[in-house]
Amino acid sequence: MSKPNNQDCPAFCPLCGADLYNVDQTCVCKNPKCNWRCTRCRDEDPENE
């Protein structure tokens, strides 16, 4: 299995509770005042199993 494990990824921003959207395997908060982001899925390269 080479796809990243997304079970730990939140559906909402842990800081402000807004929705998240995914850009190039980076989760980004939709709230422009918050701008929280998570690159865990991108950092966990599926080629390095």
Image: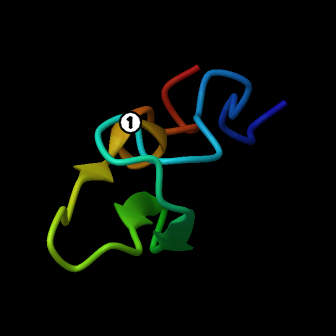
Q: Position of residue 22 (x, y in %)?
A: 53, 69
Question: For this rendering, which residue is in front, 8 or 42?
Answer: 8
Please give left or right for residue 6 compared with residue 13 in the image.
right
Q: Is residue 41 left or right of residue 10?
A: left
Query: From what the image shows, is residue 44 above or below residue 38?
Result: above
Kindly identify the residue that appears in the image at 74 percent across and 38 percent down: 2
Expressed as whole percent of the image width and height from the top left, the position of residue 8 reads 62, 21
Position of 32 with respect to 19 (left or right) is left
- Establish if 11 lies above or below 35: above
> Of residues 31 and 25, which is closer to you in this image?
31
Q: Quadrant of the C terminus?
A: top right
Horizontal side of residue 34 vs 41, given as left or right: left
Check disc 1 and report its element: helix, strand or loop: helix
In percent of width and height, residue 12 lies at: 56, 47
- Foreground pick, 8 / 46: 8
Q: Label 1 belongs to which residue?
A: 40
Amino acid at pointer 1: Arg
Q: Which quadrant is the N terminus positioned in?
A: top right
